[in-house]
Image: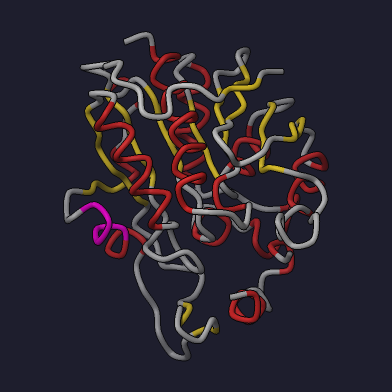
Amino acid sequence: MFALRSLAFKSVPFLVKSQSVNSGLHTSASWSGAKVAVILSGCGVYDGTEIHEASAILVHLSRGGAEVQMYAPDVSQMHVIDHGKGAPAENESRNVLSESARIARGNITDLAKLSVSDHDAIIFPGGFGAAKNLSTFAVDGPDCKINTDVERVLKDFHKAGKPIGLCCISPVLAAKLLPGVEVTVGHEEEKGGKWPYAATAGAIKALGAKHIIKDCRHEAHVDQKNKVVTSPAFMCETQLHLIFDGIGAMVTNVLKLSGK
């Protein structure tokens, strides 16, 4: 697995390796009527959305009684990764919206059509698509550019005081766009390979954001001032059910902050 990852990351130099929350993992509480936008970045961990994270988010939103609409930008992927080999596929290109439709079972909308007035909250799963297709963070680190529609919707939700959830690598989007925001991508040291992307925390600090150290087990961080909720997810090498539970804490708190 580590050898596979190292091949996939050769062209992505920046992706080499206030409040604690650990409740509501399998809550029966319902926020029926909360309308949540979920933003995808393709399909597949190395060049798009991390599929397990997207599925976990959708399960927790369903359990919470939320109404979900998925979106993705209608743009080309940065590149296509052969997930079996962990290396770029030569002479192949894919569209982020079309690839994201695989996860959404076809029910997906161009991100350009998203209006903040139609939703109570927004959530970004991780996967390298957030750093390759929604931004250029994978190549440019703190000097990255953000997709125009991603920047628009993040700023619109923040201005409207509506909650924003991000997990895995996607908190870098908030760190770039929201000055002084508090986020977590887990730990700041690799700790023997448990946190292979620990260097991301340094990039987040370089962007002017505050990084909060959190574990992946049942934890999320809530920036109450900015209504931004983050969880490390697959920034950590751990068991899948712990990733699922940490995402559950993120989703639950996003729904709580929505006020529905």
The quadrant in which residue 259 appears is top left
Q: Position of residue 32 (x, y in %)?
A: 22, 17
Residue farthest to the top, as pictured? 259
The quarter of the picture where the C terminus appears is: top left
246 left or right of 97?
Answer: right
Number of numbered labels in the structure image: 0
- The residue furthest bottom is 90
Q: Which of these two is toward me, 59 or 179?
A: 59
The one of 233 and 50 positioned closer to us in this rendering: 233
Q: Is residue 97 left or right of residue 178?
A: left
Q: Residue 176 in the image: state x and y as whole percent.
A: 67, 39
Tell me how the rendering is colored: secondary structure
Q: At x 46% / y 24%, what residue is drawn?
A: 157
Q: From the image, which quarter does the N terminus lie in?
A: bottom right
For this rendering, which residue is in front, 42 or 111?
42
Chief SS of the magenta region: helix
Inspect the magenta stretch and tell me whether residue 101 lies in it.
yes
The residue under the point 25% across, 37% down is: 69
Residue 31 in the image: above or below residue 239: above
Q: Residue furthest left?
A: 106
What is the quadrant of residue 252 in the picture?
A: top left
Q: Nearer the viewer, residue 248 or 46?
A: 248
Q: Position of residue 232 (x, y in %)?
A: 60, 43
Tell me if residue 159 is in the magenta stretch: no
**Could you tell me residue 35's position as x and y percent?**
27, 24
Depicted 213 relative to depicted 144: above or below? above
Q: Which residues are magenta?
A: 100-104
Q: Residue at x 75, y 35 (%)?
A: 213
